[in-house]
Amino acid sequence: MTSDLGTRTTTTLDVARIRSDFPILQRTVRGGRPLVYLDSGATSQKPVQVLDAERTFYETHNAAVHRGAHQLAEEATEAYEQARATIAAFIGAAPGEVVFTKNATEGVNLVAYAMSNAATAGPEAARFVVGPGDSIVVTEMEHHANLVPWQMLAQRTGATLRWLGITDGGRLDLSDLDTVVDATTKVVAFTHQSNVLGTVNPADVLVRRAHAVGALVVVDAAQSVPHQPVDVRALGADYLVFSGHKMLGPLGVGVLWGRAELLAAMPPFLTGGSMIEVVRMEGSTFAAPPQRFEAGVPMAAQAVGLAAACDYLTAVGMDTVAAHERALTSLALEGLAQLPGVRVVGPLTTEARGGAVSFVVDGIHAHDVGQVLDDLGVEVRVGHHCAWPLMRRFAVPATTRATFYLYNDESDVAALVAGVGHAQTFFGGAA
Amino acid sequence: MQLDQMYQEVILDHYRHPHHRGLVEPFDAEAHHVNPTCGDEVTVRVRLDRSDGVTTVAEVSHEGLGCSISQASTSVMSDLVTGRPLDRALAAQEEFRLLMQSKGEPADLDQDLLDDAMAFAGVARYPARVKCALLGWMAFVDAAARAAGTED
């Protein structure tokens, strides 16, 4: 690895070549500044390969999938199901275990609502029923998407919400794991990789404890599937969700992966066309998974685009992506540590850590840091990052967050660090 | 360069040395507002005075957590409304709201009424920051409405 901050080459990745695939990275912002995009944790940019795949679908195959018998319908259905197979292979799953959702948030809601629907769904759904006396366990570092749906499930069913805390260093506090997750626990839901702290959680420890008490495990992989190799079999969870748009794919498509035997027994969430077996005025029966969970005409073009994104990432290699981001994260942690008055919220080394670097600057609110960075063309996220309880845990109103991806390089990190220094100069004495 | 247009000296001065900061008693009503997109929050307290048939904003105090724009705007607002008849204070709020919707091209605004608040014209060029600038004003309107209600 080179530590020359001025170049566009890094690790084993040819970043210049990758950047040439992303048209938006060629544009300028705020009066001619080159764009330094450090907000991929919110949404990633899209390579032409993904844009072309989506466009080609519309130009040559577009039809409503799983309906009709004409040639376009056959081709569209084939493209949609091929996309499912590609995406399943990307995470080590069987195609029938991949349910398309609009995003990770919908995936979590799908499971949470299916669980409350289980109470009236018949004996095969009994294992999903939660109620008074049961507990649902999350963590204090969850994105609202993996917290609020569980709060609501608890509210609907009378179950109790519990959570694992966080250490000052930004790791899950597992000291009371065996008491928080106990015989009453029906679900353990946790983020694989924190969108704020960057922390990669010990999935093996959590899965082992959850399964020891017979609880289902739901993993929010919105920040891990795009940035590190993820194999659902190795992970050992029961459900896993992620969003396409954070991994070079289009907006509006995400995935819920679930174990085949669980999906087969789970009642539906959204109902309507496509997800039925037989419909009579008196009542209906439902299709087998994954169709049971895909009511309505699905986002076929977006699924095709997401498959193209998986192909793109596979060609680069997820190990390579992860190593590249680790190198950039290490540089960012080092660079920010050089600035007095800047404190990183989260692990200070790259061990079990992804490329989200959140920090606070003494005397300068994150909004103002972000404004100065934006003026320099450096686009970061500021605020609570949809993880308000986590902000409270660290007693900060907001943080500035930089996130890295395969199209970033050392010069982007250098621009970040210089920009934060510039903010300190600009607001000097403002404390 | 563009930064200087946004962060006018008036704004930075009020941010560094906020006026009317620190909640005081007595007060007639208070309002707590949050900006759910960023977590900023402010509490504004209002005390009204009614004499000779005119309701006047006798005192405003505030406390909160937030960026320079929200903190400075709340400070400027407190200066502007204190001592003013309530209807003029609410008129100032309406002018300020129009200024924030102006996308940085203010026209037909009562600049005398807005006074130091005109310094926030540059903020209107940044849609993401408009809510910051409005936070304290919106809390004032709420608190004043409650205070006026308690007086009747």
Image (spheres, rainbow, N blue to C red):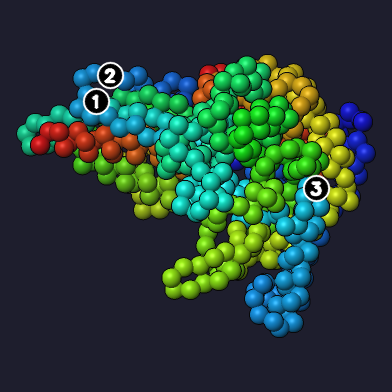
- For the residues labelled 3 and 1, the Cα–Cα distance comes to 65 Å
Residues behind callouts 3 and 2 on a single chain: no
Viewer-nearest residue: A133 or A176: A133
What amino acid is labelled 1 in the image? Glu
Decide: marks 3, 2 in contact (CB < 8 A)? no
Q: Quadrant of residue B56?
A: top left
* Residue A253 located left or right of residue B37: right
Q: Quadrant of the image for the N terminus of chain A?
A: top right
Q: Secondary structure at mark 1?
A: strand
* Residue A5 located left or right of residue A286: right
The crowding category of the residue bearing disc 1, from other C-alpha atoms within 10 Å (few below 14, some 14 to 19, many at least 20), is many
In primary-sequence order, the first of circles 2 and 1 is 2
Q: Which mark is residue B24?
A: 2
Q: Secondary structure at mark 3?
A: loop
Q: Which residue is mark 1?
A: B59
Q: Chain of mark 3?
A: A
The crowding category of the residue bearing disc 3, from other C-alpha atoms within 10 Å (few below 14, some 14 to 19, many at least 20), is some
